[in-house]
Amino acid sequence: MKKFLNKPENFVDEFLEGILIAHPDKLEHVQDDLRCIVTKNKQPGRVAIATGGGSGHLPLFLGYVGDGVIDGCSVGGVFQSPSAEQMYNVTKHIDNGAGVLYLYGNYGGDIMNFDMAAEMADMDDIRVESFIAADDVASAPKGEEGKRRGVAGIFFLYKVAGAKADKKASLDEVKAVVEKAASGTRTMGVALTPCIVPEVGKPSFQLGENEMEIGMGIHGEPGIRRGEIRPADEVVDEMMEAIVADLPYKSGDEVSVLINGLGATPKEELYLVNRRVAQFLKEKEMTVYRTFVDEFAASLEMAGFSISLMKMDGELKELIDAPANTPFYAQHSCNN
Amino acid sequence: MKKFLNKPENFVDEFLEGILIAHPDKLEHVQDDLRCIVTKNKQPGRVAIATGGGSGHLPLFLGYVGDGVIDGCSVGGVFQSPSAEQMYNVTKHIDNGAGVLYLYGNYGGDIMNFDMAAEMADMDDIRVESFIAADDVASAPKGEEGKRRGVAGIFFLYKVAGAKADKKASLDEVKAVVEKAASGTRTMGVALTPCIVPEVGKPSFQLGENEMEIGMGIHGEPGIRRGEIRPADEVVDEMMEAIVADLPYKSGDEVSVLINGLGATPKEELYLVNRRVAQFLKEKEMTVYRTFVDEFAASLEMAGFSISLMKMDGELKELIDAPANTPFYAQHSCNN
Amino acid sequence: MDSGRAQKIIERIRQIMAEQKDYLIEIDGRMGDGDLGLTMEKAFTAAADEIKDKDIEDAGKLFMKAGMVMAKAAPSTMGTLVATGFMRGGKGMSGETEAGELSTFFTSFVEGLMERGKSKPGEKTIIDALHPAAQALEKAAGEGIGAVEALEAALSAGRKGLEATKDMVAQHGRVAYYQDQSKGMEDPGATAGVFILRGFLDVFKE
Amino acid sequence: MDSGRAQKIIERIRQIMAEQKDYLIEIDGRMGDGDLGLTMEKAFTAAADEIKDKDIEDAGKLFMKAGMVMAKAAPSTMGTLVATGFMRGGKGMSGETEAGELSTFFTSFVEGLMERGKSKPGEKTIIDALHPAAQALEKAAGEGIGAVEALEAALSAGRKGLEATKDMVAQHGRVAYYQDQSKGMEDPGATAGVFILRGFLDVFKE
Ligand SMILES: Nc1ncnc2c1ncn2[C@@H]1O[C@H](COP(=O)(O)OP(=O)(O)O)[C@@H](O)[C@H]1O
Ligand SMILES: Nc1ncnc2c1ncn2[C@@H]1O[C@H](COP(=O)(O)OP(=O)(O)O)[C@@H](O)[C@H]1O
Ligand SMILES: [Mg+2]
Ligand SMILES: [Mg+2]
Ligand SMILES: [Mg+2]
Ligand SMILES: [Mg+2]
């Protein structure tokens, strides 16, 4: 296991300390719990957005806490849910009196804990609504969308939710725009190498020297096809066919594109992938509104990437283009 | 070689295409040469800043072309210099009538080509000044600073130069502030795994299963010590001792910190490193002005990181805090 | 049930989970992430430590407290489910006889699981072990049978339920991504459910 | 020198570099990045292709053109140096005799290298092969010796210079990071310099 670590059991708390030290103007933690990260810039009256999930996916989840995006995040162990109590403590802290939207990925542990946290918040008369991101096309067939995993597409949802909340929209309005955005968002990933959870110390799965797995989840969940590595353009085409067919996205649609690195894949390769994605969309007579290429939802040092599309409309364009200023993601307004 | 590629010989041009497609509002290329990347937002009267170098280091070098930073970049093959003619074409395009600063890293091929380009520009009566970044403490002993490699610290120099140029400073003033910033900037890196140049197809060096190399360059140049992987805090301490002793940075100094991932190292580990860097500086009674943690100067999929310090003064603080908006780096003013 | 017995039960389950840790890791690791052994050990260790010196008179309250501690200590899927089970079971526990208390405890426990997990019997989960066990306890309590015998019936029903999970297709959690491949294997959560039943029985048999 | 001969020289060096590609990769790879074989092949292939059908009367202009093409095609350290050498050599080439032309060509070539590389003899570079070669040519030209004999003397001086690089400590390029470790090995750039000399001699000997 080649990693920069001290004691594996301190991994999460130590990197959280490093994050809080690096961004003292933007982030703080609730009470004595490093794992409850909240924005320093509370905005009275604004709907607050909370997320949470296991560690190991930076910038997910806490990286989007900040201006224009989300307000708080509870942080679990590597690939493990935070506790309901932590979520509840974040909720109490970030609530600006306008209610809190829980926006997180579709994983059993997270769901149960967010449900428990919502019940606790309810006892405090904090209004909570929940939306569970489930954008991974590869994780369940069409018709069973509710069973799908939430992956990198959640970046789009955070961005849209935060921008809508900034406009002093109500909790229901924020949730509604997230629902709309999510209904047009689909993702698929591919992995070349596994990652190692520090406390486990060995890879959770193996891929052969020339193998890739299309559709693999960000914790190494099985994908839809394992096979020999193919030229990048062919890999992209296979993924895009599946993504585009799922919604389906059609000729004339305008979409935003997110190319997400899973950890070890260089930016050069991500942009090489973007080239083919753009060509593919052009061939299908779709237009690209905005393109985002970087690591948004990683899986430690896994090599691989995912492609997400979000169908755009006038409102979503405005929200995607609104400014953002978080430790892991900054954007000027009308940024591209 | 596990990579997302088509033909290795097309790697550079294909990722450049992907970049230009992703950022159509910000970037364009000169004439028919994809490898001459320039900002779309020319600013009459502003000193222009050009850089260039081999591919494989994204966001270096072209990633900083944009508002508030640099104006143009010539792009070479992987780890290879671009040609003098490409540099010259970039120079001609970006000159706003106030002269051009060449700001690039200390590598033989780059120097010779930038020198040739400067001679060509001179024939066109474009005033060119050059500054060669050489921040890597590990690459030559104190007293031979001029032989040192340029690595991630160049990010600080770009940022400072761009912000100074934005203030309508003259070419000499921009160069002077870069000289000042560079005189207080030092970097050291450590690598755990090599990377593979697509056209070569195999790693250029080998590190044992439990080995790290402290001081390794971003093309795999030899470092100062190869040995067993140690706990992260010990690795950081060893690097920080060398960096701090070199300038030297002293008690009472205020510094900005840059933790740079070399490619495969997860952000979690980079922040874990930052925790110890901050502790170390505190023990030495230095204060941290700003902290930057991300990939700034990568080496494809190499695992490892580097630490850079820049000594701050009032002017440098103002320049570091000025806004920036490039495809690979955005910052609001007074960002942290 | 006095709270001393409840304390012993938690402690006994802690022992069993510690002994079975590697086995749980192994069976969860076949298709899941292999954390179940760690989770169960962590949950019951935290609970046992917390309630060891606590002066709680009421056994139900003690189980609730144990559940709350587990939720903090082990917020993974099974950690949260078992925590919910103990909280709800402790809250719902009532009755004149020990068998009656055990019946209401496990009935509420399973209700809690189903609500929290949005799941029901037949979906290859811990519920498939504990739901038949709760039914067996209810029947035994209705028939006026003693606690040990009632728990023996419950354990046997739980084991049958566990065996039956082999033929089910997983609907929840990571293993659900493997769908049909999960056929033929026992559900690891149901295995942990059987261990919980055994912990109760062992203490009552002392 | 007529431009047909200059054309043949470039073509001959292209052949040699192609034949020696793997060898150059190997020796550059010991401490450098191993690209030298690729660079030299690329540079001379591009130059040979470019000037093949060009109607340039003047041999000096043809060498200059070859240098300009190399600079574009192979902008690495040695590519740029050799390109500069050909541009400067072609520009500086003059004289009544062939040996005189060769002498002025290589003297300017080496001056170009030193200026461009900010380097001088003794620093374990291509200069250590070509500087003594240029001196040998100057001497031969002064003595009125013919081109073939002059180039034979130059090649032999270049080979001696190459041999002498073994004892030098590298001051430039990637290999300089290895400092003392570079002792005992010939400089790969100087090796390529000897190949260039051989290309000239081979054509004059035809
Ligand atoms: N929604 C659910 N309802 C009831 N039980 C569930 C549910 N989801 C998972 N389980 C149980 O949890 C077990 C897995 O627990 P655990 O290993 O903690 O989950 P994971 O590691 O996937 O988060 C399964 O074997 C199953 O018995
Ligand atoms: N400044 C310099 N002046 C003269 N020759 C140099 C200089 N730097 C390097 N060389 C020559 O270039 C050779 C290496 O060329 P090349 O492999 O293209 O360099 P790199 O791959 O390091 O950019 C060295 O062996 C040496 O002969
Ligand atoms: Mg990376
Ligand atoms: Mg599990
Ligand atoms: Mg788990
Ligand atoms: Mg070389």
Image: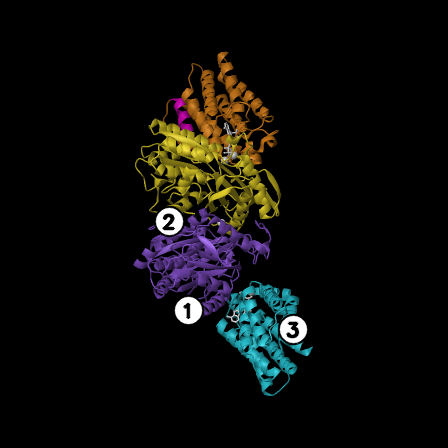
Chain colours: A yellow, B purple, C orange, D cyan
Helix, strand or loop at mark 3:
helix
Q: Is residue B313 visible?
A: no
| Above or below D180: residue A246 | above
Please name the residue that numbered disc 2 is placed on: A22
Question: Do the residues under discs 1 and 3 have CB atoms within 8 angstroms?
Answer: no
The amino acid marked with disc number 1 is Asp
User: Where does label 3 land, which residue?
Assistant: D8
Image: magenta residue range: C58-68
Real-space CA distance between mark 3 and mark 2, rounded to the nearest whole angstrom: 63 Å
Other residues around mark 1 within 10 Å, as few (<14) / some (14–19) / many (≥20): few
Q: Mark 3 or mark 2, which is nearer to you?
A: 3
**Where's residue B220, x and y in %?**
52, 59
Q: Amino acid at mark 2?
A: Ala
Q: Position of residue B238 (x, y in %)?
A: 43, 57
Task: State whether residue B135 is above or below residue A242.
Answer: below
Say if D204 sits above or below A67 in the image.
below
Residue depicted at 47% across the width and 31% down the height: C79
Q: Quadrant of residue C94?
A: top left
Q: Which of the two residues, C114 or D173, is positioned nearer the viewer here?
A: D173
* Mark 1 lies on residue: B125
